[in-house]
Image (spheres, rainbow, N blue to C red):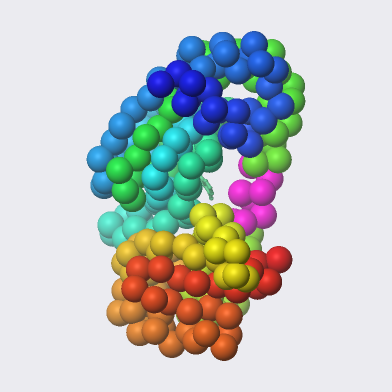
């Protein structure tokens, strides 16, 4: 098991430049948790005591309006880190995180994460790069919500999904499994019915086609 954790940690962008002995230390500190689909890992507003790495499966990062409407900020997959914001700010959780499938997470407690950042400036720099990329993404999302119609927002959503979670097929196409239409609707500010209608309207000629639960996208659209 610990070999697997070590290999996973070594593949995580945040820990990419760690020395072998540091990676050994981190492997000893990380705890593995197995979670069923639809498990809430924590709620927005909760106090924070750990940072998480997705080992397998996917999670959604969600905020809920006062009248109970869900908005999905992002979907995170294997190798991606979450739960760092509240630790860095010493603030409550900024959003809820819920599993979209069976998920394994690695859990690193607050004190260990703090020590890691203190002793390893490269990890802090990498974390800044990750946060900066998330801010760039959030800006793009604001732009699409403000200026694009629903079809444009859906196309952009599917491109981002394929870029983040897709698998190259080697024939010029990338395939990605889509979240439910309801989750997609909650990510782009529309209804489930609208997503279901539009999903079938994308055509192969445009380089984006939906078949069953999967979306196929031409690789060159992701460049
Ligand atoms: P934290 O605030 O501790 O708990 C919720 C986590 O969701 C947060 O840390 C980040 O890891 C993650 N998160 C919040 N907002 C976004 C976003 N816009 N994009 C990606 N991840 C986010």
Count of numbered marks: 0
Task: Find residue 119 and report its horizontal and vertical position in percent.
Answer: 69, 13
Image point (67%, 30%), residue name: 16
Image point (33%, 50%), residue name: 100
Specify start and end residues of the magenta stretch as a single range: 131-138
Closest to the observer: 172 or 99?
172
Closest to the observer: 53 or 186?
53
Q: Is residue 79 above or below residue 202?
A: above
Closest to the observer: 209 or 67?
209
Image position of 50 (left or right of 219) = left
Task: Find residue 122 and report its horizontal and vertical position in percent.
Answer: 74, 25
Task: Find residue 105 and report its horizontal and vertical position in percent.
Answer: 40, 32
Give the overall secondary structure of the magenta segment: helix
Image position of 183 (left or right of 147) = left
Tell me if residue 157 can be seen: no
Q: Is residue 208 above or below residue 107?
A: below
Query: Any magenta on residue 218?
Result: no
Quick one: quadrant of the C terminus?
bottom right
Image point (53%, 58%), residue name: 167
């Amino acid at each position: 098991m610990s070999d697997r954790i070590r290999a996973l940690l070594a593949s995580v962008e945040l820990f990419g430049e760690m020395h072998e002995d540091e990676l050994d230390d981190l492997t000893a500190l990380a705890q593995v948790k197995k979670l069923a689909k639809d498990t809430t890992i924590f709620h927005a507003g909760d106090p924070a005591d750990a940072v998480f790495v997705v080992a397998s499966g996917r999670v959604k990062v969600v905020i809920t309006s006062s009248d109970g409407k869900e908005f999905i900020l992002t979907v995170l997959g294997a190798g991606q880190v979450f739960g760092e914001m509240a630790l860095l700010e010493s603030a409550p959780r900024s959003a809820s995180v819920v599993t979209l499938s069976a998920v394994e997470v690695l859990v690193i407690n607050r004190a260990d994460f703090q020590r890691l950042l203190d002793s390893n400036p490269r990890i802090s720099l990498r974390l800044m790069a990750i946060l900066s990329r998330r801010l760039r993404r959030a800006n793009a999302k604001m732009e699409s919500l403000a200026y694009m119609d629903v079809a444009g927002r859906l196309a952009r959503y599917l491109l981002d999904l394929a870029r983040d979670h897709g698998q190259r097929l080697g024939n010029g196409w990338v395939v990605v499994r889509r979240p439910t239409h309801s989750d997609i609707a909650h990510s782009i500010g529309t209804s489930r019915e609208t997503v279901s209608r539009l999903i079938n309207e994308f055509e192969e000629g445009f380089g984006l086609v939906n078949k069953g639960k999967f979306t196929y996208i031409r690789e060159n659209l992701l460049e």
